[in-house]
Amino acid sequence: MVRLVLRCLLVVVAAAALTTGCRSAPNPSPPAPTTTTTPQPGPTNVFTLTEGLEHDVCGIGLVVKFIPATASSSTADYAVVMYGPIGKVPDLVQDHTGDQPLPPNATHPQQGVVISLGGSRFGVNRIDTSTNQIMLTALCGATS
């Protein structure tokens, strides 16, 4: 009878050990995060606009153009950012100077300022007149 009790006890202990071993197995690791092409606010949405090249972001096309600051300026060092439909940004600042009113699809960016174009906002990180480039941060959808 003692042997029967010991065998039953041994079976119970073995079963408990096996069940505990199954419960303590590590959980599978979560799947790797996927990347998205939809811009989200943050430093990963920094991009450079180069004069003459369109950059499509936030559902609009952006173009930068450097024009003379005044009619008497000898250099084109006044940045103007224009927006429009992707692939069809109209250049409405032809023959303009910085001291003239800009068309409704254009704005003059200033470093450290947030500009609004086409319903989206962009932080102006850097303006480089030596390379005719500006660096912006897309704040898509942010309207305030």
Image (tube, rainbow, N blue to C red):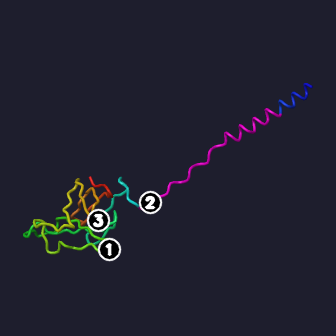
The magenta stretch spans residue 12: yes
- x%, y% of residue 109? 21, 60
Q: Local crowd at mark 3 within 10 Å, few (<14), some, or many (≥20)?
A: some
Asked if 7 appears above or below 39 in the picture, the reply is above
For residue 79, side relative to residue 12 (left or right): left
Distance between the Cα atoms at labels 3 and 2?
Answer: 21 Å
Disc 1 marks which residue?
87
Q: Amino acid at mark 3?
A: Leu
Q: Quadrant of residue 88?
A: bottom left
Q: Nearer the viewer, residue 51 or 95?
A: 95
Q: Looking at the image, is mark 3 or mark 2 earlier in the sequence?
A: 2
Q: Nearer the viewer, residue 141 or 122?
A: 141
Tell me the element at label 3: strand
Q: Residue furthest right?
A: 1
The magenta stretch spans residue 13: yes
Q: Quadrant of residue 139?
A: bottom left
Disc 2 marks which residue?
36
Q: Looking at the image, is mark 3 or mark 1 earlier in the sequence?
A: 3
Disc 3 marks which residue?
49
Q: Amino acid at mark 1?
A: Gly
Q: Amino acid at mark 2?
A: Thr
- x%, y% of residue 44? 38, 56
Distance between the Cα atoms at labels 1 and 2?
Answer: 22 Å
Tell me the element at label 1: loop
